[in-house]
Image (tube, grey):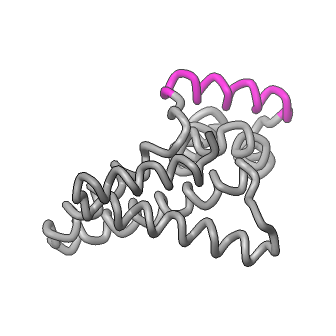
């Protein structure tokens, strides 16, 4: 089942359950996917493009969540945490720290990186491998750890 079909099913279910929070997030994701398709001039997005849109939406919310917590806006932070939970249901299974660390180590060997100078090449090789399965900041931290 494609992401759009899954979103449509979940949207119907959220309407039946009168779950306004989930309904709002699902509608927002559908709109983002449609906007991306229009921007790219396509009728349908590939799985990878859909994943990119989902990752972007998730990252925006996580960034906002951090800012709201720093500003002491617990009411808004709580709402965003609920949105993040809904979005994560559509993301692929996240890699564990150990799995991610192994991918980083293998990629460092593949690229032949030896110092922090090579960080850009390692990051550009790792990110496509873990797309949607790991947070970029987590990858960055592990790459720095292994290159220092």
The answer to whether any part of residue 10 appears in the image is yes
Residue at 57%, 23% (x, y): give it: 99
Nearer-the-camera pick, 34 or 133: 34
Relative to 11, 40 lies left or right: right
Q: Quadrant of residue 82?
A: bottom left
Rendered view: 56 above or below 96: below
Give the main secondary structure, helix, strand or loop, of the magenta stretch. Answer: helix
Relative to 79, 89 lies left or right: right
Q: Where is the N terminus found, in terms of image quarters?
A: top right
Rendered view: 83 above or below 91: below
Which residue range is magenta in the image?
96-112
Spot occupied by residue 97 in the image (x, y as percentages of width and height):
49, 28
Spot occupied by residue 66 in the image (x, y as percentages of width and height):
32, 63
Magenta stretch: includes residue 99:
yes
Relative to 120, 141 lies left or right: left
Spot occupied by residue 45 in the image (x, y as percentages of width and height):
74, 59
């Amino acid at each position: 089942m494609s992401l759009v079909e899954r979103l449509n099913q979940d949207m119907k279910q959220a309407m039946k359950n009168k779950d306004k929070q989930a309904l709002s997030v699902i509608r927002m994701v559908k709109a983002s996917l449609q906007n991306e398709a229009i921007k790219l001039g396509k009728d349908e997005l590939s799985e990878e493009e859909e994943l990119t849109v989902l990752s972007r939406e998730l990252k925006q919310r996580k960034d906002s969540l951090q800012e709201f917590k720093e500003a002491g806006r617990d009411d808004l932070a709580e709402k965003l945490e609920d949105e993040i939970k809904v979005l994560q249901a559509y993301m692929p299974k996240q890699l564990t720290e150990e799995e991610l660390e192994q991918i980083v180590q293998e990629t460092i060997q593949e690229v032949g990186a030896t110092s922090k100078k090579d960080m850009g090449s390692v990051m550009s090789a790792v990110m496509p491998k873990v797309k949607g399965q790991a947070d970029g900041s987590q990858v960055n931290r592990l790459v720095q750890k292994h290159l220092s």
